[in-house]
């Protein structure tokens, strides 16, 4: 059953998520003048909204007329994205990718959409945690064998409500991890096209880590350091590698294999 496993592993799962969220800021272009995916998303939306993107109906009519029209698929993706219809935009960009698999700009746009989807799911998970379920999550992280844990006792919510919270949280977490995995696949393609692009490498490392593929995350960050050892973010990348390696050892000790992106 999932829920007993969630209870057993909650402590390291939440600790790792907190680590990833905290360190994400450095790689999303916050502080230190980075040029990460956060900057790309901002530029992407600004460009689209000022470029006279056609309506969804007009763009869809072109696609319906000729689904193999790559330009039409890209127009439709942009139209959906302007309207914040992320899943539809992803579908259109995936169709475009089949027609133009080496378009680096479109691939970055697709990766950004998977990141947006993952972030939305992560926000839902946090909302579940914050909406009246503090007692439940506090008890998950509490060592029941400790004096404090014994004194705290069981969470003050019903079994049915506990299951609802667990399911809502786990559904959102699974969706976020899947979206990060798909995002990592796109960055893998981009790093194959441009092996020395440090922005792509750091984005691949972060997406892989958030997808739970620690090995891929470590490998991408090590490649980042090999390509650009004097990069302003080098110290942060080294710190992240150490944390990922520590997390990998913790998972191995707990008998929990890391995820593998792709497939």
Image (cartoon, helix red, strand yellow):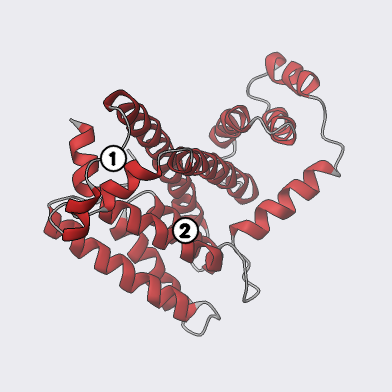
Task: State whether residue 217 is above or below residue 225.
Answer: above
Q: Is mark 1 on a helix, strand or loop?
A: loop
In this view, the residue in front, 212 or 123, is 123
Instruction: Point out residue 123 in the picture as x, y percentages from the top left corner.
Output: 52, 43
- Residue under the image location 19 percent in, 57 percent down: 251
Query: Residue 195, position in %: x, y?
Result: 48, 64
Q: In this view, does 234 lie to the left or right of 102?
A: left
Judging depth in this view, the residue of 28 and 159 nearest the camera is 159
Residue 155: mark in rendering: 1
Of the 4 image quadrants, the one containing the N terminus is top left
- Secondary structure under badge 2? helix
Residue 258 appears in view: yes
The residue that appears at 40% across and 44% down in the rendered structure is: 134
Instruction: Say few, some or many: other residues with alpha carbon within 10 Å of mark 2 (under 14 / 14 to 19 / 20 or more).
Output: few
Is 64 placed above or below 8 here?
above
**Which circle, 1 or 2, is nearer the viewer?**
1
Please tell me in which quadrant of the rendered image residue 43 appears: bottom right
Location of residue 106 (image quadrant): top right
Name above or below for residue 183 compared with residue 228.
above
**Which residue bears the numbered disc 2?**
21
Query: On residue 111, which mark appears?
Result: none
Quarter of the image where the C terminus is located: top left
Q: Earlier in the sequence, mark 1 or mark 2?
A: 2
Task: Please report the residue visible at 23 percent of the width from the left and 62 percent of the height from the top.
Answer: 248
Left or right for 6, reference 218: left
Looking at this rendering, what residue extends furthest in the bottom direction? 230
């Amino acid at each position: 059953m999932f829920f007993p496993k969630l209870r057993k592993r909650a402590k390291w799962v939440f600790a790792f998520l907190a680590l990833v969220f905290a360190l994400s800021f450095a790689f999303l272009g916050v502080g230190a003048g980075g040029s990460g995916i956060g900057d790309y998303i901002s530029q992407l939306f600004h460009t689209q909204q000022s470029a006279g993107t056609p309506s969804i109906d007009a763009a869809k009519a072109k696609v319906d007329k000729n689904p193999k029209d790559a330009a039409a698929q890209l127009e439709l993706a942009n139209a959906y994205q302007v309207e914040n219809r992320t899943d539809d935009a992803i579908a259109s960009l995936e169709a475009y990718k089949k027609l133009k698999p080496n378009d680096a700009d479109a691939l970055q746009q697709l990766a950004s959409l998977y990141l947006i989807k993952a972030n939305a799911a992560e926000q839902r998970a946090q909302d579940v945690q914050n909406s009246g379920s503090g007692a439940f999550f506090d008890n998950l992280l509490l060592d029941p064998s400790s004096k404090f844990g014994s004194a705290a006792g069981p969470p003050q919510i019903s079994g049915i409500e506990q299951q609802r919270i667990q399911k809502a949280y786990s559904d959102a977490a699974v969706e976020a991890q899947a979206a990060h995995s798909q995002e990592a696949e796109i960055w893998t393609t981009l790093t194959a096209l441009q092996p020395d692009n440090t922005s792509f490498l750091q984005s691949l490392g972060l997406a892989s880590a958030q997808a739970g593929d620690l090995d891929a995350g470590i490998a991408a960050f090590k490649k980042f350091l090999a390509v650009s050892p004097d990069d302003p973010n080098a110290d942060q990348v080294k710190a992240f590698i150490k944390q990922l390696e520590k997390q990998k050892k913790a998972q191995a000790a707990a008998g929990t294999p890391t995820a593998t992106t792709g497939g």
